[in-house]
C-alpha cells in the first residue's frame, strides 16, 4: 500500500516578497501583504524601505506598508541580497540618495550591469563595479535598451528608474526572465506597455506614480524545488506542496524533472501570480540537457537539479548558464566541487557543467556560504551521508529548511 503524500508548506516567494515591499513603499496608499517571506534577504528590503521613509508594521501575519515620497538615507546594508541592491539602485536613482553596502559575497557581485544603464539615463552614482556604491538623486531621461544579460534584476532596476524618468524608458529582452515586476507594476497602475518585436519582448514605461496594491505572496517555487528533488530521489515517496507560485517564467524545474522521469502533477489557480498545488512521486530518474531559453526559468534551481542529476541514470548537461558564476557564490564551481566531494563525476564548463549520474557515496561539501548550495546538498543527504560546512546561510531564503528536512526524513523512514 502506498502511503499518503507528505505535505510541505514552503515559505513565501523571495522575488515577489522584495517587490511587494519595495513597490508599495514607493506607492500612494496602504497595502496589506500576506505570505511575505520572513528571511534575511527580504528583511534587508524591509529595513531599506523604512530608512527611505515608508511605514511598515506587522499586524499578525500581515505586513502593512504605507508608502510615500522617499527621503535620502545614510547607509543601506543589503547584506547578501542582490535583489535588494539592484532593484533599489534603480528605484532610488530618480528619487533619493543613499550609500549601498553589502556582505562579502554581495560586495563581489557585478553592479555595473545596472550602474551603466542608470548612468545612460543620467543617474548620479559612483562607478562601482561592485558595492559600496553611492547614489544621489538626479533628473533621469528614458533610454532604449536591448538586454545583453538575461537578468530580471537589471530589467526591474531600469523599469523602476523609468517610472521616475522623462519620456519613455524601453527595455527589450531577447530571452524572457521572471516577470514579477511587470505583473505587479500593471496591478499598481503603472504606464507600462509590452510588445513583441524582432529583438524580443519590449517593455516600455513612462513616468508616473504607483497605487498601493494588496499582495498575496505565493510559496517560493525555488524553495519548493528542493522538496521536488528530494521526493524525486526517493522511489515510492510522495510529497505535496500547496500554494506554490506557478508563474510560467519560473517553472522550468518542473518541466526538467518531468523530462528526467519524475511523476509530477500540478493543479493551478490563475491570478496576478498563478499559484497551485504540486505533487511529486519518486521513481527512477534519467539525465537530460538544460540550455537556452529554459535557463533563466530555472536559474536558481540548478543547484537542486544538479543533485537530481547526480542520482539519475546517464549524463546531464547544463549550458548557457554562465550567470551561475555571479550568484551568491560561483555556483558552477560550488556545484561541481560539491558533486565531486560526494563521489560524483562532474566537470565545470565556462557556461555550465556536466554530471555523470550514479556513483554518489557521500562526503563533506563546502557551501561557499551559499544558501542554495547548502540546501541542495542537504537534500543529497537523504540518499548518501553528506556533511556541509555551514548551515547559517539558509537564513537568507528559508529559515525553517533544516527542520522541514528532518520532518521529511522521519516521514520516509519505513515503519517498523
Ligand atoms: C531575481 C532574479 C535572478 C535570480 C535572483 C532573484 C529577482 O537574478 O537569480 O535570485 O528577484 O529578480 P538575476 O536578475 O541576476 O538573473
Image: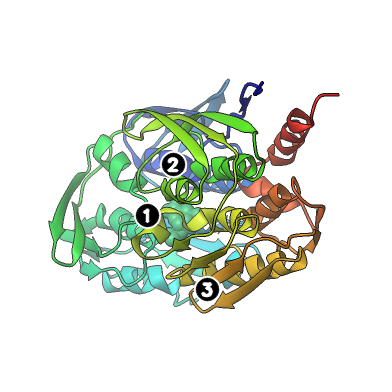
Q: How far across and down, in percent of the image, does residue 162 sit? A: 25, 57
Q: In this view, does 158 lie to the left or right of 289?
A: left
Label 1 or label 3, whichever lies nearer to me, is 3
Task: Left or right? Give the position of 395 relative to 284.
Answer: right
In primary-sequence order, the first of circles 1 and 3 is 1
Name the residue beneath numbered marker 2: 16
Closest to the observer, 142 or 5? 5
Residue corresponding to mark 3: 130
Disc 1 crowd, CA 10 A, few/some/many (<14, 14-19, 20+): many
Tell me if residue 274 comes above or below residue 354 in the rendering: above
The CA span between labels 1 and 3 is: 18 Å
Q: Earlier in the sequence, mark 2 or mark 1?
A: 2
Q: Residue at x 69, y 47 (%)?
A: 379
Camera-nearest label, 3 or 2: 2
3D distance between C-alphas at marks 2 and 1: 16 Å
Horizontal side, residue 97 vs residue 58: left or right:
left
Q: Which residue in the protein does label 1 denote?
A: 91
Amino acid at each position: 500500500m502506498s502511503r499518503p503524500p507528505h505535505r510541505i508548506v514552503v515559505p513565501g516567494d523571495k522575488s515577489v516578497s522584495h517587490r511587494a515591499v519595495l513597490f508599495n513603499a514607493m506607492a500612494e496608499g496602504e497595502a496589506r501583504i500576506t505570505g511575505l517571506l520572513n528571511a534575511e534577504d527580504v528583511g534587508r528590503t524591509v529595513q531599506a524601505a523604512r530608512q527611505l521613509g515608508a511605514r511598515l508594521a506587522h499586524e499578525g501575519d500581515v505586513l502593512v506598508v504605507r508608502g510615500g515620497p522617499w527621503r535620502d538615507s545614510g547607509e543601506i546594508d543589503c547584506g547578501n541580497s542582490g535583489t535588494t541592491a539592484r532593484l533599489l539602485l534603480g528605484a532610488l536613482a530618480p528619487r533619493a540618495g543613499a550609500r549601498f553596502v553589502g556582505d562579502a559575497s554581495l560586495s563581489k557581485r557585478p553592479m555595473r550591469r545596472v550602474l551603466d544603464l542608470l548612468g545612460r539615463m543620467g543617474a548620479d552614482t559612483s562607478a562601482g563595479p561592485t558595492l559600496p556604491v553611492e547614489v544621489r538623486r538626479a533628473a533621469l531621461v528614458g533610454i532604449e535598451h536591448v538586454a545583453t544579460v538575461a537578468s530580471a534584476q537589471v530589467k526591474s532596476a531600469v523599469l523602476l528608474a523609468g517610472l521616475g524618468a522623462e519620456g519613455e524608458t524601453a527595455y527589450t529582452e531577447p530571452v524572457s526572465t521572471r516577470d514579477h515586476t511587470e505583473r505587479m507594476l500593471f496591478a499598481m497602475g503603472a504606464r507600462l506597455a509590452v510588445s513583441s518585436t524582432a529583438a524580443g519582448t519590449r517593455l516600455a514605461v513612462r513616468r508616473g506614480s504607483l497605487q498601493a496594491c494588496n499582495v498575496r505572496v505565493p510559496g517560493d517555487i525555488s524553495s519548493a524545488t528542493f522538496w521536488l528533488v528530494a521526493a524525486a530521489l526517493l522511489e515510492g515517496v510522495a510529497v505535496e506542496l500547496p500554494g506554490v507560485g506557478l508563474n510560467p517564467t519560473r517553472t522550468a524545474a518542473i518541466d526538467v524533472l518531468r523530462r528526467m522521469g519524475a511523476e509530477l502533477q500540478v493543479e493551478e489557480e490563475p491570478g496576478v501570480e498563478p499559484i497551485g498545488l504540486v505533487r511529486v512521486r519518486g521513481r527512477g530518474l534519467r539525465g537530460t540537457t538544460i540550455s537556452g531559453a529554459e535557463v533563466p526559468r530555472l536559474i536558481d534551481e540548478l543547484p537542486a537539479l544538479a543533485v537530481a542529476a547526480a542520482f539519475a541514470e546517464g549524463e546531464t548537461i547544463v549550458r548557457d548558464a554562465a550567470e551561475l558564476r555571479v550568484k551568491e557564490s560561483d555556483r558552477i564551481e560550488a556545484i561541481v566541487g560539491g558533486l565531486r566531494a560526494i563521489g560524483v563525476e562532474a566537470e565545470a564548463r565556462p557556461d555550465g557543467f556536466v554530471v555523470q549520474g550514479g556513483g554518489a557515496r557521500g562526503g563533506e561539501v563546502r557551501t561557499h556560504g551559499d544558501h542554495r548550495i547548502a540546501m541542495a546538498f542537504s537534500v543529497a543527504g537523504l540518499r548518501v551521508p553528506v556533511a556541509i560546512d555551514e548551515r547559517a546561510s539558509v537564513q537568507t531564503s528559508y529559515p525553517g529548511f533544516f527542520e522541514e528536512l528532518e520532518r521529511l526524513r522521519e516521514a520516509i523512514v519505513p515503519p517498523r
